[in-house]
Image (cartoon, coloured by chain):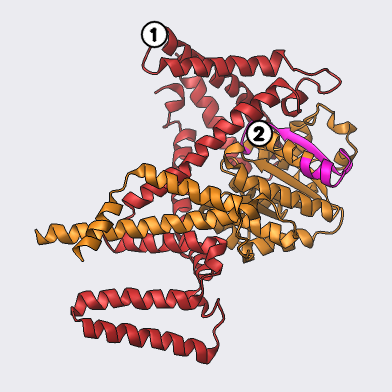
């Protein structure tokens, strides 16, 4: 029991404390361990983890095929792909040693592994990702609804980012956006007053103000900047977005800190299956 | 009025396969018949360009490739443009990969730019160090001692036999870092473990979806700039004066975005009509 419980906890606690202290103590041995040895150990462990991961994957997929669990047909494809990759990676290069050495053959044109990457993995991977465009279009059509103030805010910023980020956004003048704002305000005035005459006067005055101001001040396409989509989207990226992203990052940082403390104090023991 | 409302409701409940078809068309048609919309470089892109432009000739630049074929349309044009810019200014390029797939992407960029366009000499003008497993530990390893992590390059050549590697032992020996990234491990790990602790300036090129995460580091000055998605790549192509796949993709993306916005507006109109009718009855 001591080897399965106390010793692993002790290793984690000692290594954890040394790693933390390495940031605060200017001692060459500790610094060397943190910056050099620990990362080397991690690299070695990560390499073994890849092997373990692969073995685990193949075990699960083979079990699925043997017991004919739901979707076992797909597991045959997974296992075949795995075996093919192993063969192409370790046993059949497809070219002479003078063209590519073992290891270098992975990215060399004409090898079996590169063929697999170019003609099987790349198209499949690209296809999966490309499908997102269709699902995003369909989902935004059905789910992006102006249900409340927050949803409206999200929708408006989403539209500004989507149009402002692409070149077509830079050819939409500030004037056009101001006209749109006047028309949108006109809808609200109509809902509020329920009087066509008032709405008409409001919209006519608004459009006149925008047009006259534009001509008098000689606004180019990107002026006033506050109504120019690329400028607005940059502002959204730089300020409201950064504020939100930072708060999330601080939250994550505090979470990592709390979890790390639990590890080094031996409270968190999920890594030994408890 | 009721007929118009009915028409909107009909549009609101359209089968999603029609939406898929329209999206496919609006993406394919502009790719086949480009409109050539003007590309306006943003400040964040211009900052990356200026940072590379201000490096003295022969600077040692680490180029890290962290993306796979799935995000190739966004990241690869950035890598190509950055590589072109670096080789045009005669900088020395060192290429690493934090993603296994990145090795293939990097090799492709090397073939296209370093070999075919610039006839650069391997080992003298650029080195391809390749992929090592370990995520952020690899970044940390490069920062502390690159030679312990990389004993051979991608082509199984010993590091000590590569002339360009002379004098390179850790991250501080580089003058600049550019990370072409699509997620973890990537840009953020480079900022946290390499660029920020050592003071070596860095810039990044990321997918559009990552811009939110990366922007705080740009605003804080921990990165000189960011190429944000395919538009960022197209802007960089415009800045170096060499149009590529990102520029040709921008027309398609522009139209696709407009159509999605149109869908959202139509969907909302239908939603309001439906809600008003429900209130009435």
Label 1 sits on a secondary structure element that is: loop
Query: Which residue is nearer to you in this view: A22 or B235?
Result: B235
Question: Residue B252 in the image: x percent, y percent?
Answer: 55, 53
Q: What range of the chain is rendered magenta?
A: B112-136
Question: Residue B90 in the image: x percent, y percent?
Answer: 86, 53
Q: Which residue is drawn at 45% across and 90% down?
A: A212
Eye-nearest disc, 1 or 2: 1
Residue B271 figure quarter: bottom left
Q: In this view, does B258 lie to the left or right of B110?
A: left
**Colour of chain A in the rendered structure image:** red
Residue B129 visible in the shown view:
yes
Residue A30 visible in the shown view:
no
Q: Which residue is drawn at 45% across and 64% down?
A: A160
Q: In this view, does B234 lie to the left or right of A245?
A: right
What chain letter is assigned to the residue under label 2?
A
Question: Residue B175 in the image: x percent, y percent?
Answer: 78, 53
User: Does the stretch in magenta take in B116?
Assistant: yes
Question: Residue B26 in the image: x percent, y percent?
Answer: 50, 51
Asked if residue B266 is positioned above or below residue A217 in the image, the reply reads above
Asked if residue A274 is positioned above or below residue A221 in the image, the reply reads above
Res. A39 mark: 2
**Colour of chain B in the rendered structure image:** orange
Disc 1: which residue: A67
Q: Give the number of callouts.
A: 2
**Mark nearer the N terminus (1 vs 2):** 2
């Amino acid at each position: 029991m001591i080897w399965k419980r106390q010793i692993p906890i002790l290793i984690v606690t000692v290594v954890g404390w040394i790693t933390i202290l390495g940031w605060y103590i200017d001692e060459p041995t500790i610094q060397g361990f943190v910056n050099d040895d620990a990362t080397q150990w991690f690299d070695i462990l990560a390499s073994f983890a890849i092997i373990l991961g692969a073995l685990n994957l193949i075990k699960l997929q083979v079990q699925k095929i043997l017991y004919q669990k739901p979707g076992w047909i797909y597991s045959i494809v997974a296992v075949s792909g795995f075996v093919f990759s192993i063969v192409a990676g370790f046993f059949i290069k497809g070219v002479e040693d003078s063209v590519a050495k073992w290891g270098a053959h992975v990215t060399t044109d004409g090898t079996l592994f590169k063929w697999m990457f170019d003609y099987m993995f790349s198209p499949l991977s690209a296809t999966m990702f490309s499908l997102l465009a269709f699902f995003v279009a369909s989902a935004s059509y059905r789910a992006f609804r102006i249900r409340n103030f927050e949803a409206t805010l999200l929708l408006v910023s989403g539209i500004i980012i989507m149009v402002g980020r692409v070149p077509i956004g830079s050819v939409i003048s500030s004037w056009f956006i101001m006209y749109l704002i006047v028309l949108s305000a006109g809808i609200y005035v109509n809902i509020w007053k329920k009087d066509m005459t008032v709405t008409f006067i409001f919209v006519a005055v608004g459009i006149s103000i925008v047009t006259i101001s534009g001509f008098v001040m000689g606004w180019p396409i990107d002026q006033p900047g506050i109504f120019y989509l690329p400028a607005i989207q940059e502002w959204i990226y730089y300020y409201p977005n950064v504020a939100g992203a930072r708060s999330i990052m601080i939250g994550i940082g505090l979470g990592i800190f709390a979890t790390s403390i639990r590890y080094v104090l031996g409270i968190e023991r999920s890594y030994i299956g408890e | 009025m009721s007929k118009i409302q009915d028409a909107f409701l009909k549009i609101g409940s359209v089968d999603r396969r029609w939406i898929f078809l329209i999206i496919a068309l609006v993406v394919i048609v502009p790719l086949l018949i480009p409109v050539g919309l003007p590309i306006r470089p943003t400040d964040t892109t211009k900052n990356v360009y200026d940072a590379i432009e201000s490096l003295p000739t022969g600077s040692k630049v680490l180029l890290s490739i962290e993306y796979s074929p799935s995000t190739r349309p966004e990241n690869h044009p950035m890598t190509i443009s950055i590589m072109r810019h670096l080789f045009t200014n005669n900088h020395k390029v060192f290429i690493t990969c934090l993603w296994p797939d990145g090795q293939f992407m990097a090799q492709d960029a090397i073939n296209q730019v370093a070999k075919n366009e610039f006839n650069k000499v391997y080992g003298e003008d650029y080195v391809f160090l390749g992929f090592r497993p370990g995520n952020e530990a690899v970044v940390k390893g490069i920062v502390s001692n690159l030679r312990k992590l990389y004993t051979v390059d991608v082509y199984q050549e010993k590091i000590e036999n590569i002339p360009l590697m002379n004098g390179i032992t850790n991250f501080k020996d580089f003058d600049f870092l550019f990370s072409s990234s699509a997620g973890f491990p990537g840009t953020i790990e480079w900022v946290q473990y390499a660029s920020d602790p050592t003071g070596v300036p860095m810039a990044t090129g990321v997918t559009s979806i990552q811009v939110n995460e990366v922007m705080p580091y740009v605003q804080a000055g921990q990165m000189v700039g960011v190429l944000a998605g395919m538009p960022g790549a197209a802007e960089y192509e415009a800045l170096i004066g060499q149009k590529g796949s990102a520029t040709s993709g921008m027309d398609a993306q522009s139209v696709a975005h407009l159509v999605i916005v149109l869908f959202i507006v139509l969907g909302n109109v239908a939603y309001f009509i439906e809600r008003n009718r429900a209130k009435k009855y």
